[in-house]
Image (cartoon, rainbow, N blue to C red):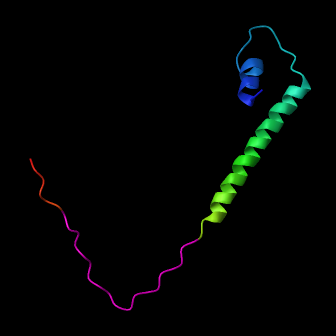
């Protein structure tokens, strides 16, 4: 059972005055499922971060060039 089903069926919503005795195995299952998902997501994130290479710093320009003006397409039909 996924953790959401365990929560919804066994503990997440009120069941009135009835109390449910939940076996320890279900608690262990929920903890282990959550840990497995967290491990998977963390490892995928670390793989993604490690695979990205940092850009090399740009060399400083010796000359300062004037800024260029953008070329706008002003031919907008109305």
The correct choice, above or below, for 27 with respect to 78 in the image is above
Where residue 29 appears, x then y in whole percent?
Answer: 84, 32
Question: Is 44 within the magenta?
Answer: no
Task: Name the quarter where the N terminus is drawn.
Answer: top right
Where residue 22 appears, x then y in whole percent?
Answer: 86, 20
Q: Quadrant of residue 51?
A: bottom right
Question: Is 64 within the magenta?
Answer: yes
Magenta: main secondary structure: loop
Decide which of 65, 11 is in the foreground and name it: 65
Q: Quadrant of residue 47?
A: bottom right
Where residue 48 appears, x then y in whole percent?
Answer: 64, 58
At a point 58% along the width and 71% down the height, the residue shown is 54
At a point 63% along the width and 61% down the height, the residue shown is 49
Left or right placement of residue 27 versus residue 39 in this view = right
Decide which of 38, 16 is in the foreground and name it: 38
Where residue 2 appears, x then y in whole percent?
Answer: 75, 29
Which residue is outermost to the left?
78
Span highlighted in magenta in the image: 54-72
Decide which of 61, 15 is in the foreground and name it: 61
The correct choice, above or below, for 6 with respect to 14 in the image is below
Give the tally of numbered discs: 0
Which residue is outermost to the right?
24
Left or right placement of residue 60 versus residue 49 in this view = left
């Amino acid at each position: 059972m996924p953790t959401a089903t365990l929560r919804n069926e066994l503990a997440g919503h009120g069941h009135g005055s009835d109390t449910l005795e939940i076996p320890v195995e279900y608690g262990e299952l929920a903890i282990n499922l959550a840990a497995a998902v967290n491990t998977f997501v963390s490892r995928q994130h670390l793989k993604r971060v490690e695979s990205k290479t940092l850009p090399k710093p740009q060399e400083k320009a010796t000359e300062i060039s004037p800024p260029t003006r953008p070329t706008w397409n002003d031919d907008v039909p109305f």
